[in-house]
């Protein structure tokens, strides 16, 4: 089995357990790194061409506009040919209830037929938000497994939860 993690993550200010903190490495990037360590999955980071504001409040405003306009922001790179992978982890922060819109710019271009998809989120209270229904809609023809919600502030302690989830759903 060959796996890849497609993820989005943002460094800079974020909301963490009730206060604003500066994150040198995004929470989702840390979770993706664990998946890489645990099962040797390749990593692909989705990056939007236009950078999001490091300022948390400004970023929430940009993200809200993009969600409301159902935007598909340009991304700097597409993952390319995924035919060698049978398992695709999809991860990102919950922004206003779902993944940041650049994730959809990428996810909607993928041929999902026959893939096993493991969605995960990092969040500050919304859990998986709407991503399970979004992934079932977007990943046509894939087997979308139960997702894992990781509390972003506690991502450093989430390795064993990720391990258990992989053990149960990806093996
Ligand atoms: C623009 C924006 C919108 C957010 N919206 C939500 C939300 O709707 N629900 C939630 O639980 N957390 C929300 N958060 C918190 C993030 O989901 C959480 O901090 C996540 O772990 C960040 O991951 P990252 O560091 O990989 O970007 C939001 C954060 C940002 C920056």
Image: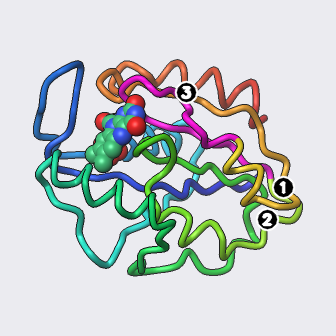
Is there CB contact under 8 Å for labels 2 and 1?
yes
The one nearer the camera, 93 or 35, is 93
Report the disc number at residue 39.
none
Which quarter holds ligand 1?
A: top left
Pinpoint residue 152: horizontal percent, then vertical percent.
35, 29
* Separation (CA) of disc 3 from disc 1: 21 Å
**What residue is rendered at 71% in x and 26% in y?**
167
Report the disc number at residue 112.
2
* Up/down of 20 relative to 2, above or below: above
Pinpoint residue 73: horizontal percent, then vertical percent.
42, 75
Pinpoint residue 144: horizontal percent, then vertical percent.
78, 44
Residue 106 part of the magenta segment: no
* Up/down of 162 relative to 6, above or below: above
Report the disc number at residue 142.
1
> Is 105 on the left or on the right of 136, as rendered?
left
> Is 119 on the left or on the right of 10, as rendered?
right
Q: Is mark 3 within 8 Å of ligand 1?
A: no
Callout 3: SS: helix
Q: Is mark 1 within 8 Å of ligand 1?
A: no
Highlighted magenta segment, given as a residue range: 116-132
Judging by the rendered image, the residue that carries numbered circle 3 is: 162
Quadrant of the drawing holding the C terminus:
top right
**What residue is rendered at 11% in x and 40% in y?**
22
- When asked about the image quadrant of residue 110, the answer is bottom right
Q: Can residue 26 be seen by looking at this rendering? A: no
Mark 2 vs mark 3, foreground winner is 2
**What residue is rendered at 78% in x and 58% in y?**
86
N-terminal of the pair, mark 2 or mark 3, is 2
* Separation (CA) of disc 2 from disc 1: 5 Å
Callout 1: SS: loop
Callout 2: SS: loop
């Amino acid at each position: 089995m060959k796996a890849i993690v497609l993820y989005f993550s943002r460094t800079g200010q974020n909301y963490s357990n009730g206060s604003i903190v500066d994150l040198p490495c995004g929470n989702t990037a840390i979770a993706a790194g664990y998946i890489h360590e645990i099962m040797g999955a390749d990593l692909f980071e989705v990056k939007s061409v236009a950078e999001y504001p490091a300022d948390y409040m400004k970023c929430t405003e940009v993200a809200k506009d993009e969600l409301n306009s159902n935007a598909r922001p340009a991304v700097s790179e597409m993952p390319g040919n995924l035919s060698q992978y049978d398992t695709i982890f999809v991860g990102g922060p919950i922004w206003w209830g779902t993944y940041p819109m650049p994730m959809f710019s990428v996810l909607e271009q993928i041929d999902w037929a026959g893939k096993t998809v493991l969605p995960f989120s990092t969040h500050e209270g919304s859990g998986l938000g709407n991503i399970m229904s979004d992934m079932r809609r977007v990943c046509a023809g894939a087997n979308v497994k139960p997702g894992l919600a990781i509390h972003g502030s506690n991502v450093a302690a989430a390795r064993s939860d990720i391990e258990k989830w992989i053990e149960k759903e990806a093996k």
